[in-house]
Image (cartoon, rainbow, N blue to C red):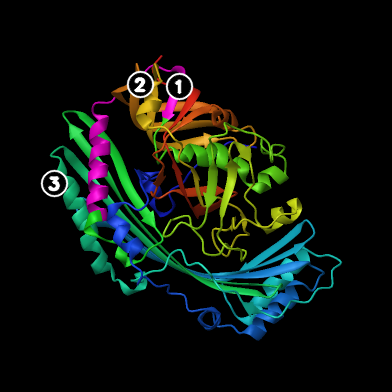
């Protein structure tokens, strides 16, 4: 398998992979998370059918047409997403746009065949044409009729909103960005330029299938980020901070703005003191939070079931076998309230459950969609996700993290004679099959004689994901979720995700630095 870029930043691509470690449930959002008055915008299938201008009778016709060539299963995925983004540069608006996405995709499965077609015009005739197309692609010998449609109840809502984004005008959003801009400039006289961004989106999702399942899901999203550029003499440095949650307008508080502003300035300021260390093979302490991207990319993708079903993952023959030390637990979780990667229901109608991938060092489960679950004879894990109605669902991560261990970060660092502490990552590459990776470490510290000493920057770490997992010898008790604007790319599709980790010691990695 070809190497691939590991991460994109969705609507904020101009500033790369935006992320910064923070503990989920930090003070700036604690009130919102604990407020029991937060309610969902979702009002059920009746609303969805009316919203998309269809009827239950039309849905049955489309599903029946999708099965007309002998398919085993069919589903319909309706989506209406509207997205707004606003950007300031040094207090002046330099970006403002809105986008609407509207349409429906038809999927037919017949044995190992999948047929897919989509339309952007939701008239019955156009939907039937799409169903005919998908049926011809995935033809079979079956003779199934769609079951009677029944509304599926969403038992756990992980992202209810108090203030919907479509109730907030652009002129109500700009003051928050202006405040973020002004606070960054005020924090340090060396600040030379500031770019502040806000992206919000709302998705209406309606799903039904030939097994009779129907559900409606209302999905909000907000991302707030800032890039800080500072100058000291003739030296210029830059860094960023961001937060992203499935929340409504209640997200925009003074506390979240203050947190992002301070983090952006602190991250940038540190770089003026940083050096590029000498390279070589050495222990690496992964800092809590943002280091979860290594877990996501170098290891997490190899746990997605499609790679294992196709035997391209190095873990394809490791199910129920030991893959790392017994004190390590790795989780993919779609149930964390307000988390960017959470899903009430995945894009195939499965609840967004919590799945242990590794438990006590044993590979417990892969991440499954409907197709891979059938292949392995297990239940789907709620990982069937797609970028939009234009794509088929595939196994995708949600919030992937390592659970906390039982030692302090200080204890971990004290065991390292000479190595590095990696804080923030920006980009990299990974080879899914073999698991080989290269990651760019934006900043961190040298570790000398068990202590953090000189700040470092602009180094690469090179290694192999499965081996790095096996080489984790200590896991800290300081688990953090990185709630930045992580967006994962796979098979040409992008999906919002999160990642997290406690501090962890990888006994040996190659660090690319000065010769």
Q: Rounded to the nearest whole Å, what is the CA distance between mark 1 and mark 2?
A: 9 Å
Q: Secondary structure at mark 3?
A: helix
- Residue 181 picture location, percent across and down: 20, 51
The residue beneath circle 3 is 186
Q: How many marks?
A: 3
Q: Residue furthest right?
A: 141
Q: Is residue 42 visible?
A: yes
- What is the distance, in whole Å, between disc 2 and disc 3 at their CAs? 33 Å
x 54%, y 42%: residue: 330
Residue 447 has which mark? 2
Give the residue displayed 53% in from the left and 35% down from the top.
Answer: 327
Please provide the residue range marked out in magenta: 256-285
Sort mark 3 into few (<14), some (14-19) or many (20+) by Cα contacts within 10 Å: few
Q: Secondary structure at mark 2?
A: strand
Tell me: residue 4, above or below residue 515.
Answer: below
Q: Residue 123: which quarter of the image?
A: bottom right
Secondary structure, mark 1, is: strand
- Please name the residue that numbered disc 1 is placed on: 283
CA gap between label 3 and label 1 equals: 39 Å
Give left or right: position of 192 versus 442: left
């Amino acid at each position: 398998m070809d190497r691939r870029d590991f991460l994109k930043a969705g609507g904020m691509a101009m500033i790369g992979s935006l992320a910064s470690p923070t503990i989920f449930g930090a003070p700036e959002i604690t009130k919102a998370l604990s407020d029991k008055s937060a309610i969902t915008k979702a009002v059920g299938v009746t609303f969805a059918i009316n919203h998309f201008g269809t009827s239950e009778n039309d849905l049955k016709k489309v599903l029946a047409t999708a099965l007309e060539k002998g398919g085993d299963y069919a589903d319909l995925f309706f989506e209406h997403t509207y997205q707004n983004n606003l950007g300031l540069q040094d207090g002046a608006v330099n970006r403002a746009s809105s986008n609407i996405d509207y349409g429906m995709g038809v999927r037919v499965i017949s044995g190992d065949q999948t047929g897919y077609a989509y339309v952007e015009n939701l008239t019955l005739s156009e939907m039937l044409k799409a169903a005919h197309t998908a049926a011809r692609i995935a033809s079979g010998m079956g003779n199934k009729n769609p079951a009677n449609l029944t509304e599926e109840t969403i038992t756990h809502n992980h992202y209810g909103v108090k203030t919907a984004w479509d109730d907030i005008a652009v002129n109500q959003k700009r003051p928050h960005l202006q405040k973020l801009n002004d606070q960054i400039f005020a924090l340090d006289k060396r600040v030379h330029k500031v770019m502040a961004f806000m992206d919000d989106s709302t998705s209406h999702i309606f799903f039904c299938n030939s097994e009779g399942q129907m559900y409606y899901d209302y999905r909000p999203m907000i991302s707030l980020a800032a890039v800080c550029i500072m100058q000291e003499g003739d030296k210029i440095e830059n860094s960023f901070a961001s937060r992203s949650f499935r929340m409504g307008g209640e997200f925009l508080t003074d506390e979240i703005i203050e947190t992002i502003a301070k983090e952006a300035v602190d991250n940038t300021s540190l770089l003026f003191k940083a050096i590029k260390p000498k390279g070589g093979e050495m222990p690496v302490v992964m800092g809590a939070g943002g280091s979860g991207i290594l877990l996501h990319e170098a290891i997490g993708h190899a746990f997605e079931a499609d790679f294992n079903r196709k035997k391209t993952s190095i873990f394809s023959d490791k199910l129920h076998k030991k893959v790392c030390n017994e004190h390590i637990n790795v989780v993919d979780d779609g149930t964390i309230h307000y988390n960017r990667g959470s899903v009430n229901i995945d894009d195939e109608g499965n609840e967004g459950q919590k799945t242990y991938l590794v438990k006590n060092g044993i590979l417990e489960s892969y991440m499954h969609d409907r197709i891979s679950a059938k292949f392995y004879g297990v239940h789907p894990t709620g990982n069937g996700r797609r970028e939009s109605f234009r794509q088929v669902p595939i196994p995708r991560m949600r919030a992937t993290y390592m659970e906390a261990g039982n030692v302090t970060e200080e204890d971990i660092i004290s065991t390292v004679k000479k190595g590095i502490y990696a804080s923030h990552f920006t980009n990299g590459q990974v080879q899914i099959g073999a698991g080989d990776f290269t990651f760019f470490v934006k900043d961190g510290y040298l570790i000398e004689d068990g202590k953090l000493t000189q700040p470092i920057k602009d180094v690469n770490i090179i290694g192999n994901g499965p081996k790095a997992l096996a080489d984790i010898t200590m896991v800290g008790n300081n688990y953090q979720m990185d709630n930045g604007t992580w967006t994962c790319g796979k098979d040409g599709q992008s999906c919002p995700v999160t990642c997290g980790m406690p501090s962890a010691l990888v006994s040996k990695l190659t660090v690319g630095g000065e010769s």
